[in-house]
Image (spheres, rainbow, N blue to C red):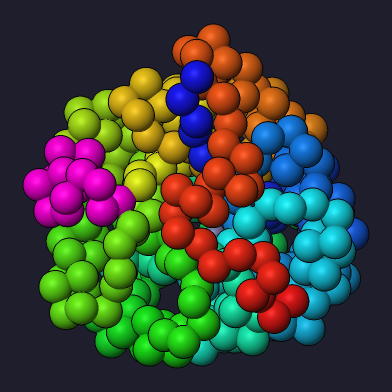
Amino acid sequence: MSKVIISCAVTGAVHTPSMSPGLPVTPKEIADQSVAAAEAGAAIIHLHARNPADGRPTGSPEVFAQFLPEIRSRCDAVINLTTGGAVTMTVQERLAAAARFKPEMCSLNMGSVNFAFFAAGARIEKWRYPWEKDYVLGSDDYIFRNTFRDIAYILETMRDAGTKFEHECYDVGHLYNLAHFVDRGLLKPPFFIQMVFGILGGIGADLDNLTFMKQTADRLFDKDSYQWSVLAAGKHQMPFVTQAALMGGNVRVGLEDSLFIERGRLAESNAQQVQKIRRILAEMGHEPASPGEARKMLGLKGADRVEI
Ligand code: KMH
Ligand code: ZN
């Protein structure tokens, strides 16, 4: 049985409370859903934070501190903190928590991209909180900014933290950006490349693109110098991560990327998505990697060296 690393991105900063009752928003909901996702088989938990009062995305380390220790004490999953935060944040705001807690992993977005999610708001008749509507419908004017200087700033800030990056690549050019930083000697293998499909503004969720991104990665990096994973937005999530697993890749699920468990049905929780992909993987003869196995596959520093 070959091992597949399941990541679960439990809340993100794209979906908002009005879009699903299953979306964890408060520190307790985020902690509980993270632990349940780990118990369901997720080896890596990718985390954002939200204002407990109204679910608005925040980069505040003080809010992360309301759930990180609890997750750490209740499960052994690898904690992966976002440095992407929300598109509306500055790169300093986005980086604050990772810089403070020095997690085993954090995301690193490998290039700028238009990042629109107004379509997710189309079906909402009544918004629960005043901030949601403008935030979602205003995304037709968002550029998710990740200049070379921004990326270098994050690399420099995290240089001595021993943190491994989840390199999020929204298009093929982002793979070349990653190669650029490798060539500058700023990154050590193994790299963890998270290929992102189906974001409006990024590469589309067509299987030819998945093959193309994988072929490009193989062209740019030695095969044994990287582990790759796939996430896909919305309705593309399960078909795409299934295809990735068939190709020998790892997978990311979670309500950050899709609110659904199947076409037209909202997922009740993150764990439900983890259980679904775990069943699919089992049918293919794959088992989820444990957190310990994921640490070995990715060369992680160990949970005892984080400052949570
Ligand atoms: N929420 C978007 C800005 C990351 O975690 O680094 C994409 C994102 C990436 O969440
Ligand atoms: Zn994220």
Q: Is residue 258 left or right of residue 224?
A: right
Q: Is residue 69 visible?
A: yes
Residue 136's image quarter? Answer: bottom right
Q: Which residue is painted at 58% across and 31% down in the image? A: 288
The answer to whether residue 103 is above or below residue 223 is below
Q: Nearer the viewer, residue 237 or 41?
A: 41
Q: Give 251 or 273, whichever is nearer the viewer.
A: 251
Judge from the rendering whether residue 119 lies leftward or rightward of residue 153; answer left or right.
right
Eyeballing the image, is 226 above or below 215?
below
x and y, in percent, of residue 131 in the image: 71, 69
Number of numbered tags placed on the structure image = 0
For residue 38: magenta? Answer: no
Magenta segment, prevailing SS (helix, strand or loop) = helix
- Specify the quadrant of the image occupied by residue 242: top left
Quadrant where the C terminus sits is: bottom right
Q: Is residue 115 visible?
A: no
Q: Residue at x 50, y 19 (%)?
A: 1
**Percent position of residue 260, x then y:** 64, 31
Give the answer, above or below, for where 158 lies relative to 85: below
- What residue range appears in magenta? 213-226
155 w.r.t. 118: above or below: below
Q: Is residue 70 left or right of residue 57?
A: right
x and y percentages locating residue 20 in the rendered image: 75, 42
Left or right: where does residue 242 sit relative to residue 85? left
Q: Position of residue 169 (x, y in %)?
A: 32, 55
Q: Residue furthest left?
A: 219
| Nearer to the camera, 155 or 91 | 155
Residue drawn 61% across and 72% down? 103
